[in-house]
Image (cartoon, rainbow, N blue to C red):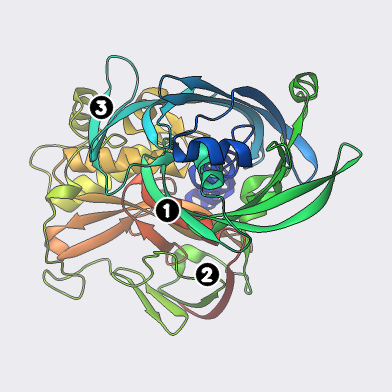
Amino acid sequence: MTHPERTMEKARRKWHWMAGGGTILVFAVLLAIRLGIPGKIYDDAQRAAAGKQAAAPSGETWLNITQNGHKIGYARRLQSQSGGGFHYGEEIRMRINMMGIVQPIAVRTEAELKPDGTLSSFQFELRSNLFGFKARGSVDGTKLTILSGAPGSETQSVLPLAETPYLGGGILTSAALENLMPGEVKTFPVLDPASLGQRPARVTLLAEEPLTVMGKSRMTRKYEVDYTGMKQFAWIDEEGSIVRETGILGIALERVAKEEALAGLEGGGGVDLADLAAIPSSVHIEDPEKLTRLKIRIAGFGEQSLSLDGGRQAWRDGVLTIRREADVAKPGGAGSYVGNLQAFLEPTPFIQADHPKIGKALKGIVAANDPEEVKARKIVAWVYKYLEKRPVLSVPNALETLEQRMGDCNEHAVLLAALARAAGIPAQVEAGVVYLRGRFYYHAWNVLFLKDRGGWMTADAALGQMPADVTHIRFVRGAVDRQLDLLGIIGKLNMEILETAR
C-alpha cells in the first residue's frame, strides 16, 4: 500500500466520526421534542369564552424522553400568563449516542408569546460538552431581529417575516384555539431557534381514540404535526393534558411525575442516531475516492425542497448521476456560473468570515500572491489537519470551531467556508449523504467557486478531499437552516446503485 493510500485508509477509519450528520440528526431529535405541547391546551369552555385572545392555562409539565423504549432524557415545560399573552419556558436534558460516543446535551428556551400564541421574543441556549450556542430575538412588525453567539461577540441578523412565527412548543396550543374537527388541517409558520430557520408546520386533528396511560384508559385526541415532511403524533386527554408524543428516530415523550423524569438518566444514550438514520447500500463500493462516476436510483421522498440537480449532479426520472470534477478544468466550461457571487463571500451568524480571528488564522495558511486554487487547497488541507475529528452535538459555528479545534463534518464545513470567504473565494455548505462501509450516512461538506475553473468545485475538509468523491450526494446547499429540509427524508430513502466507473 502506497503512502497516499495509507493516508486515505486512515482517514476512512476515522470517517465513522465524520459521517453521520450530527447537526442534522440533533435538529431532528430536538424538533421532534419541541414541536410538542406546553402542558395543557385550551378546553372548550375557555375557547368559547375568550376565543383567540385566551391566555394559556398556567402549569408545569414533566416528560420522559425515550428512544425505542430506552430513556435518554427528560423535558420540563412551563407556561404562565404574562401581561396580555403568556410566558413559555422549556428545558431539555438528554444523553445522545452519536457516532459511538454518548454525549450530554442541554437545551433551554424562554419566550414571550402573544395572546394568539405567536412569538414576541425568545432566548435560546444549546450546550453540549465544550460547545454551545446562544441566540435571542424579538419580533417587530414584519421583521425578526436576532443576536447570536457568545456575549461580547454576538452577531446581529434581521430576518424578513411574511407572517409572525410560532415557536414549535406552542403550535398545538394554537391549533386547539382553532377548534379543529377530525381531518381538519391548520398550517403555522414555525421558527427554529437552533438553525434560525423558518418553515411551515401542518397540524391535523386525526381522531378521538382511547389510550392506556399509567394503567388507566383515557379518551384522547390524536394530532399529527408535519414539519418539512417529518411527522410526529401527540395524544391529548379530555382535560387538555399531554399524555404521549411520538416522533422521528424512535423518539417518544410521555408525561410523568417530576421525580420519575429526573431519575434514571445515568446510563447510555440509546441507539446510535447516525447508524439508525443511515441508508443501506445495494452494492459494496471499494475505494470510493477512486470513482469517476456514480449512477444511483433514489426513491422514498416526496415534495421536499431538495437540490438534486445541478453542477456535477444530474437528476433524471428518479436516477441521479454524479461525475467527479476533472483535475484540470477549462474556464467557461460546463461548470461555468453566471450570477452574483457576493452573497457567498459575506459573513453569516455561523460563518464569521469577517472576524479578526478568522483573518489571523488565514494569514498563517496562505500567501497573498498564491493563485486562487492553491489558496483553496491549502485551506482544505489546513482545516483537515487542524481539527480533531470527533462528533459534536451543537450548532456549527466557524469561530467557536476555530477556538475549540475539534468537530465533525459540520464544523469542518463552516470553518472552511469562513476561511475561504475571508480569502476572497466564494464558498457554500452542502449537505446530503456519503458512502461508508456499506451504508450512506448523513454528512456535510463544501463547494468553492474557482474563477480559473469557471465554476464550483466540491471540497470535504473532514476527509481532506478536493474534489470530494462521487459518493457525496448533495440534497441541499446553503445556510445551516437549509438542513431543516432534510428532516422529512430521514428514515424514508431507498438507494440502489446502478452503475459505477473508475
Q: Is residue 251 left or right of residue 118?
A: right
Residue occupying the far left of the picture:
369
Mark 3 and mark 2 lie on one chain; the one further toward the N terminus is 3
Give the amino acid at mark 2. Phe
Give the amino acid at mark 1. Pro
Q: Tag on residue 200?
A: 1
Tell me if mark 1 has few (under 14), some (14-19) or many (20+) residues whose alpha carbon lies within 10 angstroms of its own.
Answer: some
Comparing 321 with 153, the one in front is 153
Give the amino acid at mark 3. Thr
3D distance between C-alphas at marks 1 and 2: 18 Å
Residue occupying the far top of the picture:
152
| Residue that appears at 19% across and 64% down | 455
Residue 390 seen in the figure: no
Q: Position of residue 39 (x, y in %)?
A: 64, 32
User: In the rendered image of this protein, does residue 284 appear above or below residue 215?
Assistant: below
Q: The residue tagged with tag 1: helix, strand or loop?
A: strand
Q: Position of residue 269 (x, y in %)?
A: 71, 35
Q: Tag on residue 301?
A: 2
3D distance between C-alphas at marks 3 and 2: 35 Å
Q: Tag on residue 155?
A: 3
User: In the rendered image of this protein, does residue 357 appear above or below residue 221?
Assistant: above
Residue occupying the far bottom of the picture:
317
Q: The residue tagged with tag 2: helix, strand or loop?
A: loop
Mark 3 and mark 1 lie on one chain; the one further toward the N terminus is 3
Q: Position of residue 52 (x, y in %)?
A: 46, 40
